[in-house]
Image: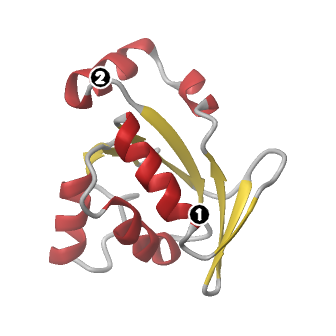
Amino acid sequence: MRPTIVLLSPPGDHQRILARLQGAGTYSKGTIFDRLDRDDCSFGVDASGDVLSEFEEEEVDEIRQKIGEFQAILLEYPGVSCVRDLLYDLIRGMSGLLDTNYGELIAYEEVLAHFQREPLWDWRTTI
């Protein structure tokens, strides 16, 4: 399986991010993952929210404390260089948290600021 991240957003921003995703390249529905092809990169997209069943209750509580009610989009990506530009387009102007799947929940604005400071930043390493 390829690496994944989870975008955690309040319902309104979730819908806007999903619309941006569907317009970010060639988007096609799938049985398990939808597929987004963008430039030379292919992404798996699961906006069903099923990924939340993998979160512990304490994690869900922490997320709710930070952003209130939320929905999730699981993104499967081929590499950080591919997902970096996509993330910029998806989360710019939105509120929410990026679950890196490396033990970090990072606010969207902090993710974008980190890309500004260090364009080649890889969240799989500590900030």
The answer to whether residue 78 is left or right of residue 94 is right
Amino acid type, callout 2: Arg
Q: Is residue 93 above or below residue 115?
A: above
Label 1 is placed on what type of residue? Gln
Q: Quadrant of residue 52?
A: top right
Residue 91 sits above or below residue 56 on the image: below
Q: 122 left or right of 32?
A: left
The x, y position of residue 7, in whole percent, is 43, 46
* Depth order, front residue of 46/58: 46
To which residue does mark 2 refer?
64
Residue 84 in the image: state x and y as whole percent: 41, 72
What's the residue at 59%, 63% (across, down)?
Answer: 22
Residue furthest right in the image: 31
Could you tell me which secondary element the residue under label 2 belongs to?
Answer: helix
Total residue callouts: 2
Q: Earlier in the sequence, mark 1 or mark 2?
A: 1
The residue located at (31%, 43%) in the rendering is 97
Q: Which residue is mark 1?
A: 22
Residue farthest bottom in this picture: 39
Which quadrant would residue 96 be assigned to in this image? top left
Residue 111 in picture, x, y percent from top left: 26, 59
Q: Residue furthest top?
A: 57
Residues at marks 1 and 2, CA–CA distance in whole angstroms = 26 Å
Q: Is residue 64 visible?
A: yes
Q: Residues within 10 Å of mark 2 (few under 14, many from 20)?
A: some
Left or right: 86 with respect to 36?
left
